Amino acid sequence: MGTTITGEATASIEEGLRNATLQARKEAAVPRGLATSLPVFAAKAEGSEITDVEGKRYIDFGSGIAVLNTGHLHPKVKAAVQAQLENFSHTCIQVTPYESYVRLAERLNAIAPVRGPAKTIFLTTGAEAVENAVKIARAHTGRPGVIAFSGAFHGRTLLGMALTGKVVPYKVGFGPMPADIYHLPFPVAYHGKEVAATLEAIETLFKADIDPARIAAVIIEPVQGEGGFYQAQPELMQGLRAICDKYGMLLIADEVQTGFARTGKMFAMEHTGVKADLVTMAKSLAGGFPLSAVTGTASIMDSPHPGGLGGTYGGSPLGCAAGNAVLDVIEEEDLCGRAERIGELLVARIRELQASNSLRGVIGDIRAVGAMVAMELVAGGDADRPDPDLTRALVARAAEKGLVLLSCGVRGNVIRFLCPLTTSDALVNEGMDMLGEALRECVAERAGA
């Protein structure tokens, strides 16, 4: 495990920076609403590793919340951004356009899981992509309503927050929410929630609450991110596609966290056999640079009037340069195939933990779609007894050992694995060794308390 002290990290140490000092400064300067799960300040990051200001090395199983599928500072992405900086950093696409924006749009149009010829607009954040997808859907249909799902996460803007299917911490204290947003139960077999019940709930909604002729779109994550890494079953997506077609609604796939090879395919929708009308993208689209997108059927994308879409920083030259490089890396390094291999390795190691005598009944469920992997922590092997306290303790103890982990889930009891798709088997195994040690220690300490 050890430490790595190089470059910027060394400079930081010489300047006397320490994590505790910086955290105190952050608390004094930054509002508490911007919470930090790991109060460790990065000084340098490369590949799948981060070095903090004190010189400690961490294996990164979080990827900045699924942003770094190509790893920290992939050489090809870094070179593309450096080359763009030699020319210009910003002109605003709405004033003076540039070729890299058009080229990246053409490439996404060719691969996105949408019906028919496609068009793409670039924005800055995932929430902004979601907001624009809803705007486009409303412009195309002339309808206001949107259906989303329990456990969903679609952003922290007012509309994104309204679409998100989790109150704490995202909605509490921020109301009222925008109108015409309706939530339905997301089917999770592990918790006894079946697809048939969700599809029936849609028809009940149409009888009890809103005329389907007033619904513009259904928005869904093909694999829920913040909600707990639950996959939308093919039969659910097929049922939603049929309902949308029946009532003239659009199907929006939120691929912000699932896109760009994370699930073993370029987009998670490819696992379902269903095509959407609109797809939102962000996170790993540009390898760490702020860039998001909405790609959709051309006739739908053209519905808003000229000037109705845009944004000063949307589709920045640096982001577009990075995005083109990311697509190159995914293809050249077969990151879809690599995602499958990483997922298999992670699942095998988690199953070993699940089966060990000292951890009996602790890991209740293991889920994986490519390298989008999760384990759900419960008490006594009971799906109805989530263990968020153990989950929090595990994240903290893993960090002490040098492993960055992220939790998620409506019940706060899911560990999600999002290591870069460029991570070597050796680093994956080293990180899992740390996780296993941390989990055993947490469970043993609880038993001895």
Image (cartoon, rainbow, N blue to C red):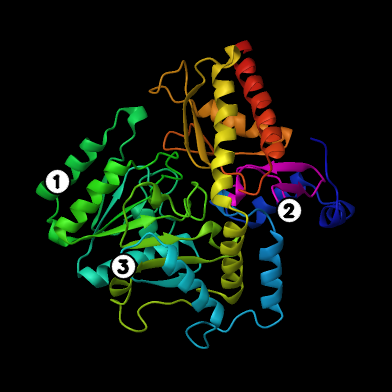
Residue lying farthest right?
A: 14
Do the residues bearing badges 3 and 1 touch, measured as CB atoms within 8 Å?
no
The numbered dot on residue 116 is 3
Q: Which of marks 2 and 3 is in front?
A: 3
Residue segment shown in magenta: 35-64
Q: Which of marks 2 and 3 is nearer the N terminus?
A: 2
Q: Position of residue 326 (x, y in %)?
A: 59, 62
For mark 1, give the secondary structure.
Answer: helix
Element marked by disc 3: loop
In the displayed structure, 129 sits above or below 396; it is below
Side (left or right) of 384 relative to 83:
left
Which residue occupies 34% across, 34% down?
188
Q: Where is residue 440 in the image (x, y as percent from the top left)?
A: 64, 20
Amino acid residing under circle 2? Glu
Q: 150 or 320: which is nearer to us? A: 320
Of labels 2 and 1, earlier in sequence is: 2
User: Label 2's element?
Assistant: strand
Quadrant (top left/top right/bottom left/bottom right) for the C terminus: top right
Q: Quadrant of residue 411?
A: top left
Quadrant in which the N terminus appears: top right
Contact between marks 2 and 1 (CB within 8 A): the answer is: no
Observer-side mark, 3 or 1, equals 3
- The image's mark for residue 46 is 2
Task: Decide if residue 149 is on the left or right side of residue 112.
Answer: left
Residue type at the position of mark 3: Gly
Q: Distance between the residues labelled 2 and 1?
A: 50 Å
Q: Which residue is drawn at 60% across and 28% down?
A: 349
User: Percent position (x, y) of residue 218?
Assistant: 27, 55
* Amino acid type indicated by mark 1: Glu
According to the picture, the residue beneath numbered tag 1 turns out to be 203
- Residue 320 in view, yes or no: yes
Q: In which quadrant of the rendered view does residue 228 lie?
A: top left
